[in-house]
Amino acid sequence: MRNGSIRWYKSKIDWWLAPLLMIPPIATLWITAAAFWRGNLSEIAVGCGAMLWVLIVYAGVVFPTRYGIGNGYLTIRYGICRQRIPLAEIRAVYPTRNPLSSPALSLDRLRVRFGEGFFKSVMISPAEREEFLRHLASAAGLNQDGDRLTRDPAPANPGSGTTSASA
């Protein structure tokens, strides 16, 4: 997969989430600095370990959070994780404010449904929402109605053996 053929969209970040995400790094930095001023080597080591742990978690599952459209897939990146959804499997996209855990840094989300069942959907929060929806509709062959995308139902197979009864 070449990154040059994928258009990336950053995640929207809610105003309240940015300060909340800053608390762990600032707290570990403050604890480490306090231990340094006291000259307590064991506390400095614990503080540095905690700071390293926070950075690893943020790099592993938080940053960068972005969404790519291209090469036949919707690609969702969050930290070192990547989820690829074939564009042809996307059934619907609609707005939600569901607070469940997802690769989205905002509650202003879009639920992307790509099959039946609970595990066949994902919530994302592209910052350039309207542009993202237009691009996804065009790339995936979806119908756009405002901030909702849907796929036309598959035509009935005439050879499926089902017939309609007539009087």
Image (cartoon, rainbow, N blue to C red):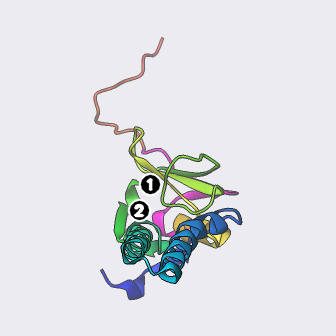
Name, please, the residue furthest toward the top.
167
Q: Quadrant of the N terminus?
A: bottom left
Asked if residue 13 can be seen in this view, the reply is no
Question: CA gap, disc 1 to disc 2?
Answer: 6 Å
Which residue: 69% across, 62% down? 16
Splitting the image into 4 quarters, where does residue 73 fall?
A: bottom left
Q: Nearer the viewer, residue 101 or 21?
A: 21
Position of 113 compared to 2: left or right? right
* Mark sitting on residue 152: none
User: What amino acid is labelled 2 in the image?
Assistant: Leu
Q: Which mark is residue 90?
A: 1
Q: Residues within 10 Å of mark 1 (few under 14, many from 20)?
A: many
Return the residue at label 2: 87
- What's the residue at 41%, 84% (across, down)? 5
Q: Nearer the viewer, residue 52 or 18?
A: 52
Q: Residue 92, percent across and down?
A: 52, 50
Give the residue at x 42% y 43%: 155
Judge left or right: residue 52 versus residue 29.
left
Mark 2 surroundings: few (<14), some (14-19) or many (≥20) residues within 10 A? many
**Residue extent of the magenta highlight:** 138-154
Per the image, is 149 magenta?
Answer: yes
